Image (spheres, helix red, strand yellow):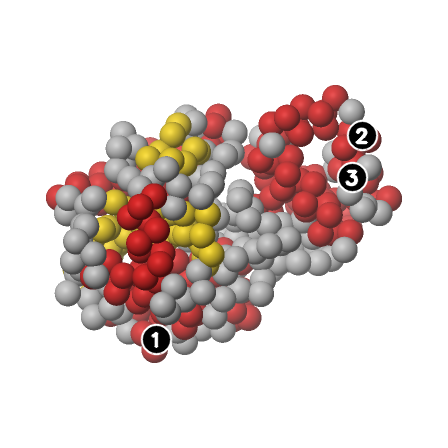
Amino acid sequence: MSLYYTQKLLYQLNRDQSLQEKFFADKESVLTDYELNEEEHAAIVTPDIGLLYILGVNGQILMHFAAMCGYAWPEYIQSMRDALDEHGNVKAGLYVTTDGKGAT
Amino acid sequence: MSLVFAGICSHAPGITGRIHMADKEDVRTLQSAMNEMRENLERAKPDALIVIAAEHFANFFMDNMPSYCMGMADHYDGPIEDPEWLGIERTRIPGVPELSRRIITSIMQDIDLAYAEEWKFDHGIMVPLHHLTPRYDLPIIPANINCQGPPLTPLHRAYAFGQAIGRACAEIPERIAIVGTGGISHWPATPDSGKINEAWDRDFLERWCDNDRDALLDYSDEQVYLDAGQGGFEIRNFIAVAGAAENSKGTVHYYRPIPIFAVGCTAATMAIA
């Protein structure tokens, strides 16, 4: 269920400006409300967008969290490509890449 | 009366959000096609527009995910995304609650439909409205088919949803238009973003224009995923419009793969039979 709560947190951040403000002011105070494992917790706090992708966060949720964290579109795409090189393919969900590289 | 307009178009957020990164000719031809679609829609003089879009975790999440949902709110706000990221200013879009409720009630004769009296529009609706109703003065009835979080509704149910919409609209005096939005093949928000299977797209659009129910439903999700990516699941929206315009034939006015928009950009309409 951990991936579920990782995605739930990002879903709620994406649609709730006040939660965003609370999160960026004090991340830990928000994270206590979600059942996350250590890897997910660290990936969200860092933030490590590439690792969140590898853990299986749906791209339609992740791309907005990435933008929220200051990633421009090319940086977002590159972070996922770099993570594929580092970690191998996506571990869960719909976003397993089909060729591991992406379009050029 | 029967539907007065039925069409499909793309809704990729890059169409507005990454317009500055796109080739000028791509932008010019797409905008020209969407202007033509807007003019056709306006000529139909609809009282309201049903937009069937696969929303992307803006309102619905895996804690309570409806396969089908329609809105019956007085108004809607959008985009839910960062307006700067999407390239569309936040605005208020009129709803039409009483009419929405009548249509929803009628559809429920055939489809177990969820309803929502609050709905924040994401790019799935905002990008098409940006082009088709740029003054946001046409009442909208949003409809969502879950195309993001499996298990997904079977394709034959998406067609039946469209048929139910078409029947419901035939029972009422108002003039209703319908637009289905989404991608055909695409791998959005992934490292594969920009990959487009043009041959697959053109084959799908041929089936859509023929409004050949059997051919439109002759896909498995497993094969769609391989051939058309997770974005290909959004064919449900286009199939629903085909169902709503059952017995009608379609025309593709525009199709052009535009990788920076992460989709083969599409504009097509049905000639309502």
Give the mark toward the camera: 1 or 2.
Answer: 2
Same-chain check, marks 1 and 3: no
Judge the density around disc 1: few (<14), some (14-19), many (≥20) Cα neighbours within 10 Å. few
Mark 1 residue type? Ala
Q: Nearer the viewer, residue B256 or A22?
A: A22
Q: Is residue B153 left or right of residue B88?
A: right
Compared to residue B92, the image places residue B201 above or below, namely below
Mark 2 residue type? Ser
Position of the N terminus of chain B, as image quadrant, is: bottom left
On residue A29, which mark appears? 2
Find disc 3 in the rendering and name its residue.
A33
What's the residue at 31%, 46% (across, down)?
A: B98
Q: Secondary structure at mark 3?
A: loop
Same-chain check, marks 2 and 3: yes
Q: Cβ–Cβ below 8 Å for labels 1 and 3? A: no
What's the residue at 47%, 70% (across, down)?
A: B154
Label 2 chain ID:
A
x and y, in percent, of residue A90 in the image? 70, 55
Mark 3 residue type? Asp
